[in-house]
Amino acid sequence: MSKPVLKISDLRASVEEKEILKGVNLEIKGGEIHAIMGPNGTGKSTLSQVVMGHPSYEVLGGEITMNGEDVLEMEVDERAHAGLFLAMQYPSEIPGVTNSDFLRMSKRARLEEGEKEQSLIKFINELDATIDELKIQPDMAHRYLNEGFSGGEKKRNEILQMKMLKPEIAILDEIDSGLDVDALKIVGDAVNSMRSEEFGALIITHYQRILDYITPDFVHVMMQGRIVKSGGIELMKKIDEEGYEWIKEELGIEDERVIQDEEKRPVRLDSCGTKEKLGL
Ligand SMILES: Nc1ncnc2c1ncn2[C@@H]1O[C@H](COP(=O)(O)OP(=O)(O)OP(=O)(O)O)[C@@H](O)[C@H]1O
Ligand SMILES: [Mg+2]
């Protein structure tokens, strides 16, 4: 298998006619772990959803390719088949579909044409072993997908999916949020166990603490729907200690969010002269 490459070029995307991504450039290759940090509401999850083809987002421009193939032309299942995987910030609950059925179906979607499906017994053995490794409650395999799972269980379950589906490029959106220290280590070990030239990952996170377990090769900062700064692990450490103000000052950014208050705030007409100021 050759080294996978996910390439995002000048990507612009909107939701409900509001432009959220305003020109994102990023290349992730096999063997690399990238981290994206950034304050709330700066477009990080939107980027992950657009890469996976969430229907609510409209692509306005730019390109995404996976191993040279046009991802924007692909349906969601084709993206998974191409080797992309997303662990969502807020995993959806799917009542009526058990966790193990979902994994079996998803694995089927990853098969190459003409490739034979793994036997049921092999699948069960692999599932049991992975559940054990991730210290997940065994009954979770037979429960409906994410229904009633605790926050931490949902996150571990996303990692279970990643380990079972063996993507080439995985995007992990806040996989560390809500995890206790033990779970954080388990998730970190799981990501590390996948590290190879055939696997690359993008970790969206707010905290440096995940780095006690996973060392990224590149760290990026997102503001206003773009990657505004990139560096190595030292960038993450500095953000952890000093926050984002220094980056905003350095780049002359006043409001880092994509959708800023003026856009949201309705015009209020009051008796303090606002009406006059607005010339109404
Ligand atoms: N489906 C949607 N409908 C309406 N607004 C949306 C939608 N998706 C994203 N947005 C808006 O786009 C902006 C960026 O959101 P996004 O979830 O990408 O931020 P984020 O960087 O992941 O933030 P956080 O760190 O809080 O997870 C926000 O203002 C958000 O409200
Ligand atoms: Mg987010």
Image (cartoon, rainbow, N blue to C red):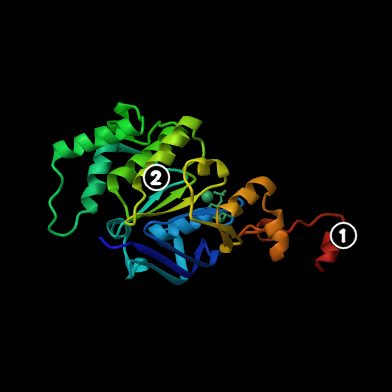
Q: Is residue 98 visible?
A: no
Which residue does the image show at 34% across and 40% down from the upper left?
160
Amino acid carrying label 1: it is Gly
Question: Which quadrant would the N terminus be assigned to in this image?
Answer: bottom left
| Nearer-the-camera pick, 257 or 169 | 169
| Nearer-the-camera pick, 210 or 152 | 210
State left or right for residue 240 relative to residue 214: right
* Mark 1 to mark 2 CA distance (whole Å): 60 Å
The verdict on label 2 being within 8 Å of ligand 2 is no
Q: Which mark is residue 192?
A: 2
Dot 1, how many residues are within 10 Å of its Cα: few (below 14), some (14-19), or many (20+)?
Answer: few
Q: Secondary structure at mark 1?
A: loop
Residue 88, given in percent of the width and then of the height, sits at 43, 47
| Nearer-the-camera pick, 10 or 273 | 10
State left or right for residue 52 relative to residue 246: left
Residue 32 drawn above or below residue 213:
below
Question: Which quadrant would the C terminus be assigned to in this image?
Answer: bottom right
Residue 164 drawn above or below residue 48:
above
Amino acid carrying label 2: it is Asn
Q: Are marks 1 and 2 in contact (CB under 8 Å)?
A: no
Q: Quadrant of residue 49?
A: bottom left
Dot 2, how many residues are within 10 Å of its Cα: few (below 14), some (14-19), or many (20+)?
Answer: some
Name the residue beneath numbered marker 1: 273
| Nearer-the-camera pick, 160 or 33 | 33
User: How many numbered discs, if any?
Assistant: 2
Which residue does the image show at 49% across and 57% down from the upper left?
46
State left or right for residue 89 relative to residue 40: left
State left or right for residue 75 relative to residue 207: left
